[in-house]
Amino acid sequence: MSFAIRNKIDVTVWLAADVIAAVEILPRARPLLARLFAGRPASSLLKQIPRLFALCAVAQQTALLSAIETARDEAITRTTKQHRIALVVAERIAELLRGLLVGHLAQDIAGAAAIRSVMQGMSALIGSGQPACGAARREATARIVAGLAAIGMPNGDGAPRPGSPLAIRIAALDEIDLKSIRIAHSFLSVADDRNIIERLLGDDPTFCHCPDLGGRAPETGPWARQMTRDRLWLGRSGAVERLKARIAEIVRLCDWLKSGAHIDSAEPGIIESYRLGSGRAATAVECARGRLYHAVELDPQGQICRFEFLAPTEWNFHRSGPVVRNLQGAVLTARRHQKAVRAVIESLDPCVGFTLRFRKVDDA
Amino acid sequence: MCLSVPAKIVKILPDHMAAVCIDGVSLEISIALIDELDVGDHVLVHVGYALAKIDPIEAKRTLELLQALGSTGRELRP
């Protein structure tokens, strides 16, 4: 069996009567990319990235390219940075939309068609890396607006159009959503970059697949971004809130792209690079599923002698991270049983493959 | 790390589904995210969904790369 087919996270939920007593997470096999990359010219690796990372490929390429440039002490122009931010944002929208379809609207034929149309509009808007102009821009924008309207995207009041596929999905999710547990939430942000990057290139080889920040395993992704930005938590933290955050972010980013994708009005920290000494650097990119890090060390010939990366999944599916925190202690009911647990897991990332098993503590 | 794998479409099924062959393994996947796919086309598959259409040469190179990575990844599986 190929590597990709068994590329799933195993989640085991331990039940004591109707209460989730514990959640065990067995991470996916982690390929040794550093071994693949070691000794190669840095430039040749940029072509390999989209083959390895079909999801968030632009963010991955941007992270590696920017880290290499920074390690070489090469400066980029403001225009180049603006183009890269626009591409990362467009990809983030496409990935968030893909998550809507995969996690919520897969059975909705019209919804799927609308999402395809929006994604095509996104490609037309900045597909060449340059924002489209004139008639092409107007046509792409109209396509995006129509597609978003078709699935019920809100227009400003923040609520999906009543009766739309999104509104129906939110209502259905609300029916089964686990009652929020009072827990201390923690969110990954640009303020954590320096600490993470220094540890990525530090001496602890486990950090890149089992990270922690002083014992914390913070959440990253659309809801974490919303909470970090707005600092407005109304006490609920279930699958519905994460879906609403995903929807709000799509609307907000589409508005930013349609208004010209100016760097001055971009959210902070979309692409941040850090030089850590001669030939050593790292870049953080805010992609759809959270904050992504690439760190490189170059030898005097410009070849990569060390490469480390840290994906958002390592935080969200950490053995003591957001999935565990949001499930442990929850009381399940007949109506809110397996579907509710699955909904919480998928709300953190609808595009991560996982297996879910339930076991009783008494049977252990 | 979200890897996807190349697959060849062997049959188009109703409801935006397709039967594909991945490295000799048969699977049914959703093709709801991509327009106008035919039998014989190659796609990248992730979590049961076709993400993008790719050409056969790119599919072969990607599969070789993933297989090389797979042999190293197994060393870390607990």
Image: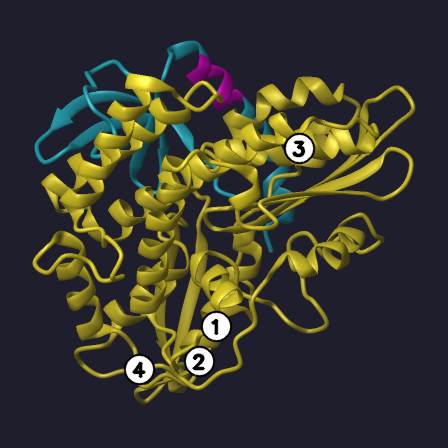
Chain colours: A yellow, B cyan
Instruction: Give the distance between the C-alpha atoms of the residues marked 3 and 1, in whole angstroms.
Output: 30 Å
The residue where tag 2 is placed is A328
Determine crowd level at label 2: few under 14, some 14-19, many 20+ residues with C-alpha closer than 10 A.
Answer: some
Which of the pair B5/A344 is nearer the observer?
A344
The residue where tag 4 is placed is A179
Q: Find residue A324 and name its label.
A: 1
Instruction: Give the distance between the C-alpha atoms of the residues marked 1 and 2, in whole angstroms.
Output: 6 Å
In primary-sequence order, the first of circles 3 and 4 is: 3
**Are the residues under badges 4 and 2 in a single subunit?**
yes
Q: Position of residue A266 (x, y in %)?
A: 52, 45
Which of the pair A92/A46 is nearer the observer?
A92
| Residue in the image at 36% along x and 75% along y | A359
Determine crowd level at label 4: few under 14, some 14-19, many 20+ residues with C-alpha closer than 10 A.
Answer: some
| Quadrant hosting residue A43 | top right
| Quadrant hosting residue B52 | top left
- Mark 3 or mark 2, whichever is nearer to me: 3
Q: Could you tell me which quadrant the N terminus of chain A lies in?
A: top left
Instruction: Identify which amino acid the numbered label 4 is placed on.
Output: Lys
Q: Position of residue A214 (x, y in %)?
A: 72, 72
Tell me the element at label 3. Answer: helix
**Are the residues under badges 3 and 2 in a single subunit?**
yes
The answer to whether residue A94 is above or below residue A314 is above
Instruction: Give the distance between the C-alpha atoms of the residues marked 1 and 4, in whole angstroms.
Output: 15 Å
**Are the residues under badges 3 and 1 in a single subunit?**
yes
- Mark 3 or mark 1, whichever is nearer to me: 3
* Magenta segment boundaries in residue numbering: B58-64
